[in-house]
Amino acid sequence: MLTDGCGRNITYLRVSLTDKCNLRCKYCVPPEGVKMLAHEDILTHEELLRVIRILVSLGVTKVRFTGGEPLVRKGAMDLIRNVSLIEGAPSLCLTTNGVMLEQFLPDLLEARVRDINISLDTLSDAVYETITGKDELSLVLKSVDACYEAGVNLKINAVPLKGINETELPDLAALARDRRIDVRFIELMPIGCAACCEGIPNDEVRRSLDCAYGPSVNAGSSIGPAAYVTYEGFKGRVGFISPMSHAFCSECNRIRLTCDGVLKLCLASPACLDLKILLRTGASDEDIARAVRDALLKKPEGHGLKFTDDRNMIGIGG
């Protein structure tokens, strides 16, 4: 079992497959764009698979593939399939913007990916284009339908943004009215260019939903940072992930692997371990495992609402 210096068990690994994305969300990519990593700076499929295999052997039971947009990486499905074949294979999950998801869904299901999160901040074509820079909402909604029909454990992730989508929050929540899915509102974290946007605290979001649908009812406990509620007539749940107003660091069980091989111990901390150096200088699996265990002793107790990483989210991994 992997344990950090605070006694928390680390069982959840988020793996960024690429820093590339087919959207340009304003809280993720700055207006001037970002300099993409050189091909040789990104971990190969073999290197990613090796790291994941080592971490699974140490106690990781859940792996989520992220980006950038993970599905834009060439051969992403080959890697995901190979991870599904690891001895003691972890549960496999995906976070995506949904634009390419419908076409990849059969392959993902074949690779035993059953948990998919789709980022969706609006149901308006015009607002979607304002946020993402692209007119792709119809493709995302088709992916939502396809996942639901396939029986995927589906979550919609929305970031409430002042002056942009705040009037739409009840409509987004209503996606859970007729379907057994989770719609989750995630407070904006001021990382990189996101610091130039203004988020909406989830307490305010919840009040607006209560005004629209009546008093909310707690929807039971869950594994993870979201607090879930439901409303009368809803088949699904509404979740609130509140890293800014209600930090959940004491229950953190995750680490993040960036596409260039940095194991981030905390999203909002510079504490990290450069695994690429170890991978490319002849370190054994035992050497890497030992380095990970030692690094985890430095995982911060909490972010303290101080976000010090100057990389944008597209470069860290969602």
Image (tube, rainbow, N blue to C red):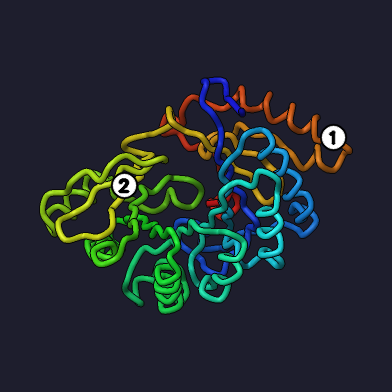
- Please name the amino acid that badge 1 sits on: Ser
Residue depicted at x 21% and y 60%: 234
What quarter of the picture does the N terminus occupy?
A: top right
Residue 133 as seen in the image, left or right of residue 289: left
- Would residue 311 be seen by someone viewing this image from the given angle? no
Q: In this view, does 291 lie above or below 234?
A: above
Secondary structure, mark 2, is strand
Image location of residue 178, percent across then percent down: 25, 67
Image location of residue 80, percent across then percent down: 66, 58
Image location of residue 30, percent across then percent down: 52, 59
* Picture quadrant of residue 58: top right
Q: Mark 1 points at which residue?
A: 284
- Please name the amino acid that badge 2 sits on: Phe
Mark 2 or 1 closer to N-term?
Answer: 2
Q: Mark 2 points at which residue?
A: 240
Residue 94 as seen in the image, left or right of residue 262: left
Q: Nearer the viewer, mark 2 or mark 1?
A: 1
Residue farthest right in this picture: 282
Residue 297 as seen in the image, left or right of residue 188: right
Residue depicted at x 32% and y 39%: 221
Q: Is residue 108 above or below residue 27?
A: below
Q: Which of 181 and 213 is in front in this view?
A: 181
Image location of residue 56, percent across then percent down: 66, 40
Residue depicted at x 43% and y 31%: 251
Q: How crowded is mark 2: few (under 14 residues within 10 Å), some or many (20 or more)?
A: many
- Would residue 21 be seen by someone viewing this image from the given angle? yes
* Measured Cα–Cα span from mark 2 to mark 1: 41 Å
Secondary structure, mark 1, is loop
Residue 165 as seen in the image, left or right of residue 277: left
Q: Which of 77 and 84 is in front in this view?
A: 84
